[in-house]
Amino acid sequence: MRLGYFEWWEEYKNSGTLKTIFWFLVLFNLGLWFSIFSSRVQQNSELYFLDIGQGDSSLVLLPGNVKVLIDGGPPNGLLEKNLQAILPLPDRYIDLVAITHPQQDHYGGFIELFKHYTIGAILTNGQSSKNVSWEELEKVITEKQIPEISLHAGDAIIYGGSQFDILSPAIGAITKDINDLGVVMRFQNNALRALFTADISAEKERELAKKFNLGAEILKVSHHGSKFSSDPDFLKAVGPRVSVIGVGKKNTYGHPTAQALNRLAAVTTQLYRTDQDGIIKIIAEGNQLRIFQRAL
């Protein structure tokens, strides 16, 4: 049956295609303006794994000074210190923030950051939390009128020659482990692939390995090196040259665990930990990955 215009629009606007186009246009325009006005124009994409204590936070800098910040660590003030160490002092604009799931060690740092930085848009998995700190974050988002959108498996964010593919969660997904609803995304351009895995479990890792070609040069290790993640078959499917664990110097979880470290050692050539190595910066030049470490 042929759809009328408004019926077609209602169906089309809920599709991943429209979301992909929307984010392409958003990032294209943001990148265009920043390539004009920013004094810091880089040619290669840069990946940073931030030293924010027990939690996760990663920054992807795209050509034209377009910035994608994935998670913000706990509310300890370290996120802003990391960004100040990386970005020029006048630069207080983040094009896109992704909150993989509503647990404080992934979003807590955004509460203060959003008060001091201008944020283009926020990507979430559509979940919320009854935690007081999450409610505080939502209040700041509302006050700052930051656009929010939830993306799911099959959606993509495209800017120039770079792309973020959303691999998980699926729309309507239900799981006994809230960590398995975390946003899993694969970043890729003509030089490298990087896989960001939030806090997913070994079960979810195996599921994704069956669905996708996960091969990537860089892996953000799942769940801070928990023994319940970093499945051997998943790691073989990814085959990372470099793996990075976001973990705090002091944590009560025993992260990273010996089990996870042993499994990672069997597949990766270089393993970094933010508790020991500080901020990890990775740049791809040809077939080479240049890796830098910096303490705060």
Image (cartoon, rainbow, N blue to C red):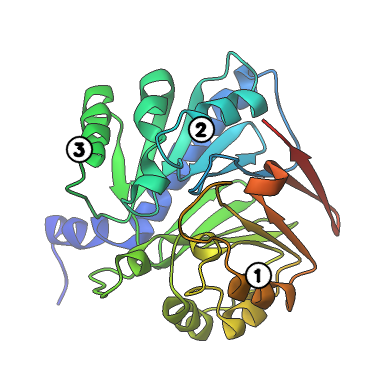
Closer mark to the observer between disc 1 and disc 2: 1
Instruction: Answer with mark 3 or mark 2, whichever residue precedes in sequence.
Output: 2
Tell me if residue 194 comes above or below residue 117 in the rendering.
below
- x%, y% of residue 244? 65, 57
Residue carrying label 3: 135
The C terminus: image quadrant: top right
Tell me if residue 133 comes above or below residue 234 in the rendering.
above
Characterize the local packing of mark 1: few (<14), some (14-19) or many (20 or more) Cα atoms within 10 angstroms: some
- Drawn side of residue 8 relative to residue 28, left or right: left
* Cα separation between marks 3 and 2: 19 Å
- Name the element at disc 2: helix
- Which residue is depicted at the point 46% across and 55% down? 252
Nearer to us in this view, 145 or 238:
238
- Name the element at disc 3: helix
Question: How many numbered circles are shown?
Answer: 3
- x%, y% of residue 295? 71, 34
Residue carrying label 2: 79
Characterize the local packing of mark 3: few (<14), some (14-19) or many (20 or more) Cα atoms within 10 angstroms: some
* Cα separation between marks 1 and 2: 26 Å
Residue carrying label 1: 261
Q: Are marks 3 and 2 in contact (CB under 8 Å)?
A: no
- x%, y% of residue 73? 46, 42
Amino acid on which the number 3 mark rests in the picture: Glu
Instruction: Answer with mark 1 or mark 3, whichever residue precedes in sequence.
Output: 3
Amino acid on which the number 2 mark rests in the picture: Leu
Going by the picture, which residue comes out furthest to the top? 90
